[in-house]
Image (tube, grey):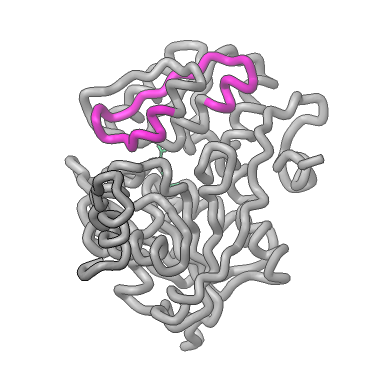
């Protein structure tokens, strides 16, 4: 039998023993060798492919915790603001738990797959004429005034669940990697990884990346109108801003920004060269290493093994993939015409 994440790490998660565990069998995602990226970057690159979680993103690790606790505390409904993945995950776990799910997403700015998921899981989807930061403010306000549980990553249970990814990496490598590279939006995930690594008495360099048009932490100020093709990290006022900054600086790492073009190039490279299809936001963690080179530790050592966190699956965002991919070849249903398209000049 597959074991729920909460059961695997029960001794490191504060879940009451009589709580009903709400699970879709999340976690246990693979670390995938990436030979072509490794060659390009000049270190052993391992991809922690979080796109292989049940709803296709790392959010499921935190959501099993947040929804289990909400249910144990008697909640009947859960709510979140989201750039898409939190919404998909909250909707699925709410359905599983028999709770009402409500998700507030920025109008026209979430990837098609994520919207499809929230709708199919039966959540109430509210499309806000505003951005993620405004949605989060509204959700904070609503949960103060109404009996509905907030499952954004300001909910501490979310980070508890997400820290398990650091445990898995250390368990699998028999110790920490030299560095971890990760996309940063609200800063919840990088904060959770640091917590997990510290609980294992380890401290790899953390290297965080934001998109240039949505890089408040790098710029040191709120971005009022964040814009990036990496819609998952289109966030101008991160909920875990200070915690993310502390985690990165305590590790001796750094946070930088990458352009949309660099993100899209890395997104296509890892799919076409190493065969791993992630959503654009994740590729910020690859683009950053390609652009800035490897981080150097305080002791002057360059990391040899770097884990890049691919936070979500490429299938989440078919529109970006189709617009970035090569041309589709249309053919008459005729063997010779097709042969010419396959083998002929220009093929
Ligand atoms: C694929 O779903 O904020 O720095 O509302 O979906 O922990 O916010 C998503 C964030 C990276 C950033 N990669 O993580 C949401 C949301 C993907 C993501 C991030 C997100 P944090």
Location of the N terminus by quadrant is top right
Location of the C terminus by quadrant is bottom left
The part of the image, by quadrant, that contains residue 272 is: bottom left
Q: Give coordinates of residue 268: x percent, y percent.
A: 33, 61
**Residue in the picture at 62% in, 53% down:** 29
Q: Give coordinates of residue 305: x percent, y percent.
A: 55, 77
Judge whether residue 281 is colored magenta: no
Can residue 278 be seen? yes
Q: Give coordinates of residue 75: x percent, y percent.
A: 60, 15
**Residue in the picture at 37% in, 59% down:** 283
Judge whether residue 108 is colored magenta: yes
Measured along the vertical axis of the image, is residue 295 above or below residue 164? below
Measured along the vertical axis of the image, is residue 68 above or below residue 244? above
Q: What span is in magenta?
A: 92-116
The part of the image, by quadrant, that contains residue 106 is: top left
Of 96 and 223, the residue lying toward us? 96
Measured along the vertical axis of the image, is residue 40 above or below residue 83? below
**Residue in the picture at 33% in, 23% down:** 138
Q: Give coordinates of residue 311: x percent, y percent.
A: 47, 51
Of 179 and 239, the residue lying toward us? 179
Q: In the image, ligand 1 is in what quadrant?
A: top left
């Amino acid at each position: 039998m597959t074991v729920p994440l909460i059961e695997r790490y029960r001794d490191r998660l504060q879940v009451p023993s009589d709580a009903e565990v709400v699970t879709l069998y999340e976690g246990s995602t693979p670390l995938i060798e990436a030979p072509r990226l490794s060659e390009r970057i000049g270190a052993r690159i391992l991809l922690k492919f979080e796109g292989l979680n049940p709803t296709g993103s790392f959010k499921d690790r935190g959501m099993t915790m947040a929804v289990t606790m909400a249910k144990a505390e008697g909640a009947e409904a859960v709510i979140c603001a989201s750039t898409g993945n939190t919404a998909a995950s909250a909707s699925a776990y709410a359905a599983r738990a028999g709770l009402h799910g409500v998700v507030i997403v920025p109008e026209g700015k979430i990837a098609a797959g994520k919207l499809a998921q929230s709708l199919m899981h039966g959540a109430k989807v509210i499309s806000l004429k505003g951005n993620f930061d405004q949605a989060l403010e509204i959700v904070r306000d609503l949960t103060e005034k109404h009996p509905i549980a907030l499952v954004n990553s300001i909910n501490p249970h979310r980070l508890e669940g997400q820290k398990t990814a650091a445990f898995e990496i250390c368990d699998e490598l028999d110790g920490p990697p030299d560095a971890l590279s990760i996309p940063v939006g609200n800063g919840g995930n990088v904060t959770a990884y640091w917590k997990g690594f510290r609980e294992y008495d380890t401290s790899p360099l953390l290297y965080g990346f934001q998109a240039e048009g949505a890089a408040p932490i790098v710029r040191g100020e709120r971005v009022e109108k964040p814009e990036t093709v990496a819609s998952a990290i289109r966030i101008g006022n991160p909920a875990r801003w200070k915690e993310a900054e502390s985690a990165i600086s305590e590790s001796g790492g750094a946070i930088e920004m990458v352009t949309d073009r660099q993100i899209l190039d890395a997104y296509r490279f890892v799919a076409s060269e190493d065969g791993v299809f992630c959503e654009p936001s994740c590729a910020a963690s690859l683009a950053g290493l390609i652009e800035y080179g490897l981080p150097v530790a305080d002791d002057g050592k360059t990391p040899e093994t770097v884990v890049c966190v691919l936070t979500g699956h490429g299938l989440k965002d078919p529109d970006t993939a189709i617009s970035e991919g090569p041309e589709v070849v249309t053919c008459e249903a005729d063997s010779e015409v097709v042969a010419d398209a396959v083998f002929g000049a220009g093929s």
